[in-house]
Amino acid sequence: MPVSGLPPYDENNIFARILRKEIPSKTVYEDEWALAFHDIAPQAPVHVLVIPKGKYCSFADFSAAASPEEIAGFIRAVGKVAHDLGLEAPGYRLLFNMGTHGGQEVPHLHVHLFGGRSLGRMIPDR
Ligand code: 5GP
């Protein structure tokens, strides 16, 4: 069950369609719990999105409603992708955008994985 107060999950959001293979994506990693694919408009030399396979929009929703297996599977996938892309030594950044203030455009939980260059300050100046 979704967390109360959140809108219902939009079955036709772009990441739901990518999960259903209705639209293509460049897959980096996939398992039972998560899918990782290259962002269509990369903001860094490495820009990968990792999404849980379950129907979750927000971190609050995911953390409250997902099973321990789903949560572990998603987190493990993020770590594996970062490792397999060779980003542990040089470093990288993980970013979740949530809601309007967070600038979230796609209402399916996702984490951005940025790497391949020095990434500067955490939050850019206005
Ligand atoms: P948000 O702003 O919601 O955190 O990030 C959504 C991300 O999804 C953006 O970085 C955007 O470039 C990416 N994106 C949007 N549509 C597509 C798509 O069809 N394919 C892929 N691979 N990425 C997409």
Image: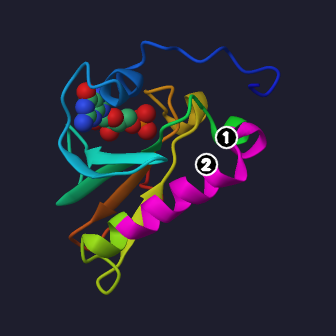
In the structure shown, which secondary structural element does the residue marked by tag 2 occupy?
A: helix
Q: In the figure, is residue 69 to the left or right of 37? A: right
Q: Relative to residue 14, is residue 32 depicted above or below? A: below
Q: Name the residue under label 2.
A: 70
Colour setup of the view:
rainbow
For the view shown, which residue lies furthest in the front direction? Answer: 32
Q: Quadrant of ligand 1?
A: top left
Magenta stretch holds residue 118: no
Residue 120 visible somewhere in the drawing? no
Magenta stretch holds residue 72: yes
Residue at 36% across, 30% down: 19
The region drawn magenta spans 62-80
What amino acid does circle 1 point to?
Phe
What amino acid does circle 2 point to?
Glu
Residue at 35% across, 81% down: 88
Q: Which of marks 2 and 1 is nearer the N terminus?
A: 1
Q: Mark 1 points at which residue?
A: 62
Residue 119 picture location, percent across and down: 32, 68
Residue at 31% across, 87% down: 89
Tell whether label 1 touches label 2 (CB within 8 Å): yes
Q: Within 10 angstroms of label 1, few (less than 14), some, or many (20 or more) residues?
A: some
Residue at 55% across, 38% down: 102
Q: Quadrant of residue 15?
A: top left
| Predominant secondary structure, magenta span | helix
Residue 37 picture location, percent across and down: 27, 46
Residue 75 visible somewhere in the drawing? yes
Q: Within 10 angstroms of label 2, few (less than 14), some, or many (20 or more) residues?
A: some
